[in-house]
Amino acid sequence: MVEYRLSPADEYNHSPSADSNFNESVYVNGFELERRFGGWMRLGNRPNEGHAEMQVCLYLPDGRIACQFRRPDLEDNQRFSAGGLSYQVDEPFKRVAMRYEGELMLLEDPELLRNPRALFAEAPRAAAVVDFQLEGVSPLHGGEPLTDSQETMYGRDFSLGHFNQHMRTQGSIAVDGQQWTFDALGWRDHSWGPRYWTNIYFYRLLIANFGPDRAMMLLKITGRDGVTRRQGVLQFDGEYEEITDLDLMTEWTAAKDPHRISLGVRTDRRAVRMEGEILTLAPLRNHRKIDGRTLESRIAEGLTLWRWDGREGMGITEYIELLEDGEPVGYPL
Amino acid sequence: MGGYRLLETDEYPHAPGDELHFNESVYVNAFDHARELGGWIRLGNRANEGYAELAVCLYLPDGRIACQFQRPTIADNQRFSAGGLSYEVITPHREVVMRFSGEVMLVPDPGLFREPKRLFAESPRAACELEWVVQGCSPIHGGLPCEPGQQTMFGRDFSLGHFNQHTTVRARMRIGASDLSFEGYGWRDHSWGPRLWQNILFDRGFYASFGPQHGITLLKIANRDGGIRRAGVLFVDGHYEPVMDLDVLTKWDARKDPTAVQLSVRTASHKAVIRGQVISNAPLSNKRRYGEAMLHSRIAEAFTRFEWDGRIGFGMTEYVEQLDHGEPVAWPL
């Protein structure tokens, strides 16, 4: 039995633990099915390291990716605001907003993301204002575990507290003289606790909305001990159903990035199949020096078009995995 | 971690327990990889019920299935010999022989299996002589669990002891006037303990050989408590590697029978994506009164061509699952 504690105060910043890698992050996304665009923004405070991780990644209707990745300085964990990105809770558990005002890189070819040095040196830039207003369309899922031994969704070395929710996302993206607005669907999460990205051996995270009453958030995660866990929820008729099983198959590109995904998902109430196609992929990376060793993970972030029982959906596919000798450890699974 | 005990004497019949449903069964399959033919033979002694389950199922090159299913009476569990089918252990853990002398039905349309009365009434028949000399080419997997609480491969309500092995087979096979003898590869198992087929809520089993050094024994199973487990071994370069994870996705025909499968498998040292194409399926079923209820399971026995990293293998896809109002409970997963 998985039980969590979650109070309205958890919507706001928590007191950092003594862990040097304490992270508290908020993430939102929103995607419009009709024009097949949208994006995500994330701010991760690392007050004990004196910086935040600030990420904006937008998949524009014309196929370009508009993005920014920075590590702005941070003095404490009092607020979510750094590097031009800010997050505000308008009503706990119901309404939040995230806004970015600053410069975005505009990429005709996402391949440039594989080489951060070239990316930052060569990518054209433009001023941007991005505004996402989000309102919950689902229950909240998760929180802080009630017992020390309780397994958490991503594992305790990735986050202690974690909750998430499917959302209605009203977005406005103004960049490079163009503006797009949408009234669509999305997802958000909020995590706190010690985190190294490289603590994830490999995982496949699939998040999408199929209308205001139907959605999914599915995770298959494998630890260094080789043990695989399957977790997550289907939203059906508005309610969350915990999954009891998940089978996942990936078709890959020549660059070993995910291209198509087939899923079999079971809850106590239903067994469903879903098919996903990644429309645009941002092949990101994370480096981290731990105990004198440099670890590198790939973080593939794919805008994905899904089909579930005749309904189309959109969302984000996130494949995180360590690279060993440059090869993703979970490939080709 | 319990482990298994396996003795040479476990190759022979065991003293039945008191359970009415005590079953002790031996099963072999074998396939000619060049001509794409072969099949499986099983004898299951149900000494406390006074009969054996006899099954012969041969997939012929012209698409017909030659088969026999009988429940010959037996007086005890002293030997594997009933209804013209016999099983002899030549060298424990190394060599066994299965022989059948009797009549088989020649089924041109596997759909007839759905109507057992018509199958037995209308099928043309032919004399059949089989002698399959089966030699182990792999280690033996399984045995009798060493600890009372230890999880067994199929669950303790399906078998207590269970071991299996990949094999090479010299198959003498005559059906009517046709000599279909071959040398090929296969798989065998031997189980004992209480068994009701309906104690499996559903399973997807894959038992195939890719030559003398490679094979699969893969099982995804849900027993009646609904909990899902993944078990089995990959046979890699002559060694067995326990399965740590398994994903199964199935393509189905209009009758909800499997037509193709995609498997992703992980062991401690290998990752494999294996694709299977059903060549011919025998849609069998089993009915059993359970208290006041009549329980009905489908047992799809599909001769399957597999591909694994360019290697071609042949073997069985076996989908056992309860039917609820005639519908397989796990479909479409």
Image: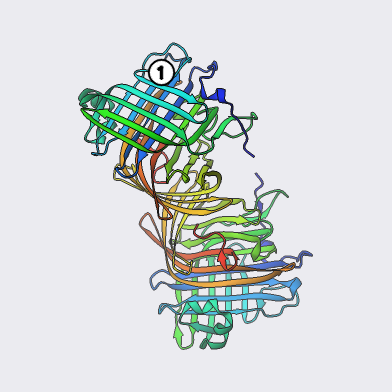
Q: Position of residue A261 (x, y in %)?
A: 39, 48
Label 1: which secondary element: strand
Residue A73: horizontal and vertical position, in percent?
Answer: 38, 13
Residue A241 image position (x, y, % from top left)? 55, 45
Position of residue A284 measured from the top left corner of the image (x, y, whole percent): 34, 32
Q: Nearer the viewer, residue B22 or B322?
A: B322
Dot 1 alpha-carbon crowd within 10 angstroms: few under 14, some 14 to 19, many 20 or more:
many
Task: Using the rendered image of the protein, determine whether residue B199 is visible from the camera's viewpoint.
Answer: yes
Q: Residue furthest top?
A: A75
Q: Chain of mark 1?
A: A
Give the residue displayed 48% in from the left and 38% down from the top.
A137
Vertical comparison of B114 with A268: above or below: below
Q: Residue at 46% across / 78% down in the picture?
A: B181
Residue A86 vertical position relative to residue B91 in the rendered view, above or below: above
Q: What residue is rendered at 43% in x and 37% in y? A: A168
User: For this rendering, which residue is in front, A19 or B317?
Assistant: A19
Circle 1 is placed at which residue position? A81
Q: Quadrant for residue A113, please give it.
A: top left
Q: Residue B90 is drawn in which quadrant?
A: bottom right
Return the residue nearer the eye: B7 or A203.
A203
Tell me, yes or no, if residue B77 can be seen here.
Answer: no
Task: Indicate whether A18 appears above or below A322.
Answer: above
Question: Relative to residue B206, is residue A86 drawn left or right?
Answer: left
Check disc 1 and give the amino acid type: Ser
**Residue B51 as seen in the image, left or right of residue A89:** right
Q: Quadrant of the N terminus of chain B?
A: top right
Which residue is at 45% across, 38% downward?
Answer: A203
